[in-house]
Structure formats: structure tokens, C-alpha cells
Amino acid sequence: MTVVGPFGLSVRDQALEADVQAGLAAVEEGLLEATKSEVPFITGAAQHLVRAGGKRFRPLLVMLAAQFGDPYAPGVVPSAVVVELTHLATLYHDDVMDEAAVRRGVDSANTRWGNSVAVLTGDFLFARASQILADLGPEAVRVQALAFERLVTGQILETAGPTDGRDPVEHYLDVLGGKTGSLVAVSCRFGAMMSGADETVVDVLTQYGERLGVAFQLADDYLDIASDSHESGKTPGTDLREGIATLPVLRLRERAARLGLPEDIALCELLDSDLSDDARHAEALAALRAHPALEQARRDTVRYAEEARAALAPLRECDAKVALIELCDAVVHRTG
């Protein structure tokens, strides 16, 4: 048994392992090539997060989805580079909005070079992704454009918050479908589409990716509370400090409104206070880690992962399907 990709995903079939490893190696080369510029400063900024590593979750999904057609088709690797460049670009922008100091265990781009350079570097990566995408045909451009619209819409809706009368949890899950699920779904769609898989297979894998993407982000939300910076490579409690209510906080507020327990109400008040103070932030983080709302958020993660697994049922049995199922388990395993 060998291990490839994020979360220690095990691939038991040697031929599949070879295909995935070769594909991911080609994606890595493609990322470095796509982030080169005639201006050395731009190259350094654009390659900052590429060289910091990362799970390459989305390219892995492209490679696995391509197994349902011709995994060696010429558009497979470039489409994986496109989705990873797009993802990296959003990270540069996210870190500016969140004022994050650390990303993937290194200084964030905004910490090292300032907000303006970080934003413009993200834009540079979007531009390079678009150049590659143009060579993949008009349908690929359309698919990516629709997904990017959903991604940005999700980010805006997160910033704006739910409208009056809208359930905050329902709103948040819709946000994640756009902000994260859309690009993960496109990763699966591109892999199947570029490999020439049947349209029914393309649709099944797209649905799988949408649900897995939400589970993946919910796991990240959980880890933002539950893990330390050594485990995650990011500053824990970043969303708390910025006043961003992820699912653990929303589940806490839901419970406080339903049960009216003094300790729940007190924790809500603490989370609504100014958490720029390190001591108050540490207190809030510790209290939320010990609260049942965090376990509820973990169960929500499990539910979406199980829905992703169920979506795969129509696909033929093969090692790639087994690997996709194991990814559902691996996402849940991240939350313990």
C-alpha cells in the first residue's frame, strides 16, 4: 500500500498510483512554469505559496476523475493547473481580507510584502490561469467562469451576512457551496470532461465534488478552532479574531437561542466582543473548543462527506472510485 496526495490517501493499485503521481508531478512543474515572470519580484511573490507546498487537493481530484476516461488526455494536467492557480489566487486575497499572518506555515504574502502586492499577485495568478484555460476550449472557459462567479458570490454573501429572516446556518452552508464547493466540483468536472468521460459520469463526479468541497471547508472550520498552528500551518482562531462566524459559532448561537443556557449566552457575548486582545481571544478559543457546538459542527462535516460518498454510487467499481470514497473518509478523519 502506498500513499499519495493529501491526508495520507492510500492508493492500492500500482498503475493508478503511477498515473496519479505522474500527474501531480506534471502539475507541480506546470505551476512553477505558470508563475514565472520576466520581473523577478513578481516571480518570487507568485511562487511564494506554490513553493510553500499544500495538499494539492484539487489537482488530485482532477487526476482521479480523469481515470473514468483517458487519464493521459492532453487537457487533464493543464486543467489541474488552472484549478490550483485559481485556488492559490483566492488564498492571496483571503489573507488580505482576514489579515492573516501565516499561510501554509510561512509568512502570508500580505505580511511579507503588504496588502497591495498580495492582491495584485492574486490577480496575476488569475490572469495566468485564464491564459491556460483559453487553450482548453470555450466549454472549459464557460465552466470555469460560472464556477468563479459562484466562488465570488459566495465570498460576497459571507461578507454581507444572511438577510433578515434567513436561517444563519442555511445561509452559511450556501456560502460554502459557492466559496469552496464550486471549485472542488470543477476539479472533478474538468478531470472527467478533459478525459472524455461520458456526460453522466461528468455530472456524477461534479455532484460528488460539490459535496466533498463543503465537507472539506467544514473540516477547515473545525480545525481553525480545534488545532494549533503547528498542525494546520495557519494561525488558529483567525476567523474568531476577525468576527467571522463559521459553523461552530453558528451552532453555538443556535443552541443559545434554543436553550437559553447562561453559559452559552456568556460565550456568545465573549465571541461578539473585541477579540483583538490576545488574552480574550485565547479565552474564547479555549471555551469554544470545549463546547458541544464544536462536536455538532464535526457531525455536520460527516454528513456532507457521507453525501459525497453516496453520490458516487452510479459509477462503475474501480480503484479510482475506491480512492474517491477514501477521500470522504480522510476529510472526516481530519476532524478526529
Image (cartoon, grey):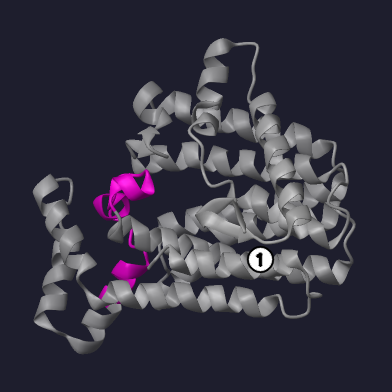
Question: Residue 166 is drawn in which quadrant?
Answer: bottom left
**Secondary structure of residue under mark 1:** helix
Residue at the image position 19 percent from the left and 62 percent from the top? 271
- Residue stretch rendered in magenta on the structure: 228-253
Q: Amino acid at mark 1?
A: Leu
Q: Dot 1 corresponds to which residue? A: 324
Residue at the image position 51 percent from the left and 56 percent from the top? 7
Find residue 78 and report its horizontal and vertical position in percent: 77, 39
Viewer can see residue 166: no
Neighbours of disc 1 within 10 Å: few (<14), some (14-19), many (20+): many
- Residue in front for this viewpoint, 71 or 95: 71
Find residue 40 and report its horizontal and vertical position in percent: 56, 11
Looking at this view, name the residue that lies furthest to the front: 1
- Residue in front for this viewpoint, 317 or 187: 317
Find residue 140 and report its horizontal and vertical position in percent: 81, 49
Quadrant of the drawing holding the N terminus: bottom right
Quadrant of the drawing holding the C terminus: bottom left
Q: Is residue 73 left or right of residue 20?
A: right
Task: State yes or no: residue 178 in magenta.
Answer: no
Is 210 situated above or below 236?
below
Q: Is residue 158 left or right of residue 192?
A: left
The number of numbered discs placed on residues in the rendered structure image is 1
Task: State yes or no: residue 247 in magenta.
Answer: yes
- Residue in front for this viewpoint, 145 or 66: 66
Viewer can see residue 129: yes
Is 137 situated above or below 313?
above
Is 216 situated above or below 24?
below
Residue at the image position 14 percent from the left and 84 percent from the top? 261
Residue at the image position 80 percent from the left and 46 percent from the top? 76
